[in-house]
Image (cartoon, rainbow, N blue to C red):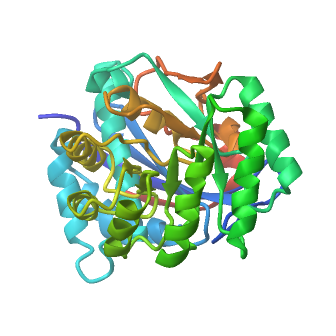
């Protein structure tokens, strides 16, 4: 028998970016929403899990926790994590099996893992078993769609000078030839040895993706991310057969079954599973194993949960690197994770590492709940 949950607390926050508004083909972002869950136990250990969204609506996940999940969590043995998550998931039968309901479950799952790893006295990556002791980072922070071509080149060059070996550039302008020219300018500026990734954020049709995605090979682009809407697996499979560049997907995929279908249909070359969109760490590990069994690399999508995903990456042999993004708000965390000479420095403190600082909570909390 393990510790039992005695109280569930949540806090919903809106945190402004510490930089100018950033745009991709779908969204304009000037603040990020966070939902943090604290599971109190009769052993005195408090598990903390946090999830996020850069579009409005995360408050719905807080309501789900208060009304659906917290009553189930009270009294549960935290070592029965997988059984607990399944029970939480079944409460959603008529109100939503993906989206906000799943995001709320993931926050709870992170908190359950946090209790276990804190009791073990080790960080998550030690608990899982490590494949490496540092993780290569690539940066998205200099590649936003609304940046001018001059800003794009300047920021990409500055990131390389900081020690990054790879950068990601957003695509999806109304005229795709502008995207093509911008990637060409960045390639010329950073030279042939730096990896350049591209991200469309689902804005293209198959015809556009087939033509312009194919032309990106002119600049030795490392991957083409989210070229089309994620529901259209068939189109992704057609695209992957038509172009040389690997297609990367995962940011807006919420289930292991969807990843299975992408992989089996040959619709993906880079798996970008995000534990904050799945049911948490356990389902992420299942997707990682599935990718590995098909000799596909997994490179987690992550905007703000780098400390979590860096630890998952460290425990996954076929994870070559990890995204670095939204650096302007990395100070919101207790003991933020840093990139030094292009590599994440992994944490030593016990736990999962998703605890927001007291200063962040006091300044930016919008709503709280408490269930006994």
Q: Considering depth in this image, is 251 or 69 the residue closer to the camera?
A: 251
Q: Residue at x 69, y 36 (%)?
A: 331
Residue 269 image position (x, y, % from top left): 36, 50
Residue 339 image position (x, y, % from top left): 62, 25
Residue 189 image position (x, y, % from top left): 79, 37
Instruction: Choose top left, top right, bottom left or bottom right for residue 268.
Output: bottom left
Q: Residue at x 37, y 44 (%)?
A: 110
- Say left or right for 147 vs 27: right
In what quadrant of the picture does the C terminus appear? bottom left
Residue 273 image position (x, y, % from top left): 38, 51
Q: Considering depth in this image, is 364 or 172 the residue closer to the camera?
A: 172
Residue 22 vs 5, above or below: the answer is below
Q: Considering depth in this image, is 260 or 369 the residue closer to the camera?
A: 260
In what quadrant of the picture does the N terminus appear? top left
Residue 202 visible (yes or no): no
- Say left or right for 328 vs 315: right
Instruction: Choose top left, top right, bottom left or bottom right for residue 242.
Output: bottom left
Numbered label tally: 0
Residue 158 vs 201, above or below: the answer is above
Residue 31 visible (yes or no): yes
| Residue found farthest to the left | 1
């Amino acid at each position: 028998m393990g510790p039992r949950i005695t109280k569930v607390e949540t806090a919903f926050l809106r945190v402004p970016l510490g930089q100018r508004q950033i745009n991709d083909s779908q969204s304009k972002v000037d603040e990020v929403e966070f939902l943090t869950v604290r599971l109190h136990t009769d052993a005195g250990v408090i598990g903390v899990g946090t999830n996020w969204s850069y579009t409005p609506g995360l408050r719905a996940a807080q309501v789900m926790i208060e009304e659906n999940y917290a009553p189930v969590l009270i009294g549960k043995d935290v070592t029965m994590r997988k059984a607990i998550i399944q029970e939480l998931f079944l409460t959603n039968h008529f109100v939503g099996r993906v989206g906000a309901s799943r995001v709320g479950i993931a926050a709870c799952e992170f908190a359950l893992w946090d209790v276990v790893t804190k009791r073990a006295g080790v960080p998550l990556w030690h608990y899982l078993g490590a494949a490496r002791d540092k993780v290569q980072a690539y940066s998205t922070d200099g590649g936003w769609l609304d940046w001018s071509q001059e800003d794009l080149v300047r920021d990409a060059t500055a990131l390389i000078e900081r020690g990054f070996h790879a950068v990601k550039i957003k695509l999806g302008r109304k005229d795709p030839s502008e995207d093509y020219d911008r990637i060409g300018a960045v390639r010329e500026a950073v030279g042939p040895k730096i990896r350049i990734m591209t991200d469309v954020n689902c804005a293209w049709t198959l015809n556009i993706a087939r033509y312009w995605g194919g032309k990106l090979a002119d600049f030795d682009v490392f991957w083409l991310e989210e070229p089309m809407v994620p529901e259209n697996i068939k189109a992704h499979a057609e695209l992957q057969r038509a172009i040389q560049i690997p297609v990367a997907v995962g940011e807006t995929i919420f289930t292991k079954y969807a990843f299975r279908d992408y992989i089996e249909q040959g619709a993906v070359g880079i798996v970008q599973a995000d534990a904050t969109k799945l049911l948490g760490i356990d389902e992420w590990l299942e997707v990682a194993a599935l990718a590995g069994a098909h000799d596909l690399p997994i490179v987690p999508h992550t905007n703000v949960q780098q400390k979590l995903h860096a630890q998952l990456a460290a425990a996954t042999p076929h994870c070559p690197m990890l995204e670095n993004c939204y650096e302007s708000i990395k100070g919101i965390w207790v003991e933020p994770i840093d990139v030094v000479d292009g590599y994440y420095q992994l944490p030593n403190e016990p736990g999962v590492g998703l605890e927001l600082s007291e200063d962040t909570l006091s300044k930016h909390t919008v709503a709280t709940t408490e269930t006994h």
